[in-house]
Image (tube, helix red, strand yellow):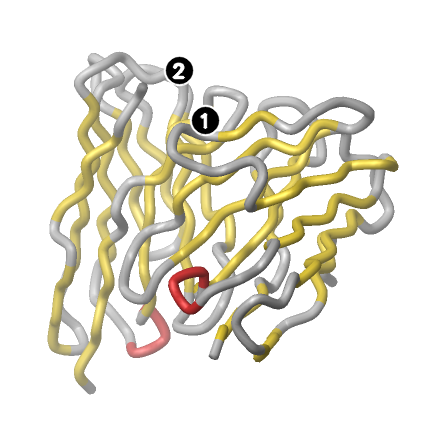
Amino acid sequence: GAVVSQHPSRVICKSGTSVKIECRSLDFQATTMFWYRQFPKKSLMLMATSNEGSKATYEQGVEKDKFLINHASLTLSTLTVTSAHPEDSSFYICSAPIGSNQPQHFGDGTRLSIL
Amino acid sequence: GQQVMQIPQYQHVQEGEDFTTYCNSSTTLSNIQWYKQRPGGHPVFLIQLVKSGEVKKQKRLTFQFGEAKKNSSLHITATQTTDVGTYSCASNTGKLIFGQGTTLQVKP
């Protein structure tokens, strides 16, 4: 069964709306989670590393004020796309390793469409 | 930062033909992981290679890690339609840096 749960699976909303995506680790604690974005026919691009109890670490070129990450508990990280615009439409996906240097387990992803 | 280049970007094969995808890095990798992503789905972990020259097999899939730990390959023998998807290598340095992925199409 799934070890990482991500919700919602699909969001369609108007430009200017803020969208929150949740990523939960099931039956294990994740001090670190990762957020990726994937455009059609492109590879997964790491956006940021979510750290429980501290600030997220963003990859170069990713606006931290645009993509707010909160990792308030050992099983939950959230990504909020603030004031979303059509160019933010993409497939957002989270992952978490069960242990250090262990393979990543991915959520099912969230397909975000901004009209 | 560390980058992993992967080729080819796309590969169309006839069912039963073999398939190979290659990953290369300009720097030495501590390890490399391989993932498969079906269309519309999320990446699923296949394997991790750590040792120089390591070769691992999973049924029809053979994974290799180069002697210099700068390259890796995935070879599928006698492809089946169920092999369709995007195969991506990823360098794990505490966070995953993915290669561009190779999308495999298999014609029945």
> Disc 2 residue type?
Ser
Task: Write down the quadrant of residue A72 in the picture.
Answer: top right
Q: Residue drawn at (78%, 28%), measured in percent from left and top?
A: A52
Q: Is mark 1 on a helix, strand or loop?
A: strand
Residue density around tag 2, few if under 14, some if 14–19, many if 20 or more, within 10 Å = some
Dot label at residue A60: none
Label 2–label 1 contact, CB within 8 A: yes
Task: Write down the quadrant of residue B67 in the picture.
Answer: top left
Q: Residue drawn at (66%, 49%), measured in percent from left and top?
A: A79
> Disc 1 residue type?
Asn
Dot label at residue B30: 2
> In the visual, does B49 lie left or right of A10?
left
Chain on which label 1 sits: B
> In the visual, does B80 lie left or right of A48?
left
Q: Is mark 2 on a helix, strand or loop?
A: loop
> In the visual, does A40 lie left or right of A51?
left
Chain on which label 2 sits: B
The residue wearing badge 1 is: B92
